[in-house]
Image (cartoon, rainbow, N blue to C red):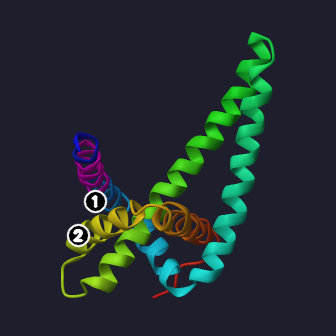
Amino acid sequence: MSEIIRLFVVIVFLTIGLAAHFLVIAALFPARTAKTRRLLSSAPGRSFGVGLVNFVFFAVVALVLFSLAENTGPFIRGVLTIPALVITAFLLIMLAFGLNAAAGLVGERIFPELPSWKQSLWGTVCLSLGCAVPFAGWFLLLPYAGFIGVGAFILGFFQRDAVP
């Protein structure tokens, strides 16, 4: 019983931290967040395809570099580890922006009458609790939200802004 309570407390604290993280990202990068959210809502299928292909490709490249660096000397280890760390950091940045947009979109669709920061907050809570559901959340919802978010973030770099 204590394990269940501990797991529940961990999920609650991680959700609070994730909500704060997403609110800070939205406050510091409002244009990038809005563009990613707009692309996420307008082209989810395209975002999923682009996100899946790019995430898998860069994750495999980073894993190969890490595994090659493990069996080499100290100099080559540094040469191979630095690009692997850069690729991993870039993947995490894309995932943070993408999940931020996905959480904002969930909040926007569930709570349309609330201000945007409350939509982002409640969307993060809903998305993180949905992703905590065993099997369906872990293996279906979380990868889907991550891939469409990464794809929308990448597509945001290649689409021009509308001229007013």
Residue 18 in magenta stretch? yes
The residue drawn where x is 45% and y is 63% is: 99
Q: Residues in magenta?
A: 6-19
Q: Residue furthest top?
A: 74
The residue drawn where x is 29% and y is 84% is: 110
Q: Nearer the viewer, residue 149 or 110?
A: 110
Expressed as whole percent of the image width and height from the top left, the position of residue 40 reads: 51, 78
Quadrant for the N terminus in the image: top left
Q: Nearer the viewer, residue 108 or 144?
A: 144
Quadrant of the image occupied by residue 86? top right
Q: Which residue matches tag 2?
A: 117
Q: Nearer the viewer, residue 7 or 39?
A: 7
Quadrant for the C terminus in the image: bottom left
The residue drawn where x is 74% and y is 11% is: 74
C-beta proximity under 8 Å, tags 1 and 2: yes
Q: Which residue type carries mark 1?
A: Leu
Between discs 1 and 2, the one toward the N terminus: 1
Q: Which residue type carries mark 2?
A: Trp
Quadrant of the image occupied by residue 148? bottom right
Expressed as whole percent of the image width and height from the top left, the position of residue 112 reads: 25, 87
Principal secondary structure, stretch drawn in magenta = helix
Instruction: State left or right for residue 132 relative to residue 154.
Output: left
Instruction: State left or right for residue 129 relative to residue 54.
Output: left
Vertical order, 68 against 122 (above or below): above
Q: Nearer the viewer, residue 2 or 97?
A: 2
Q: Which residue matches tag 1?
A: 23
Q: What is the crowding at mark 1: few (fewer than 14 residues within 10 Å), some, or many (at least 20)?
A: some
Q: What is the crowding at mark 2: few (fewer than 14 residues within 10 Å), some, or many (at least 20)?
A: some
Instruction: State left or right for residue 19 relative to residue 89.
Output: left
- Residue 152: assigned label: none
Expressed as whole percent of the image width and height from the top left, the position of residue 70 reads: 74, 21
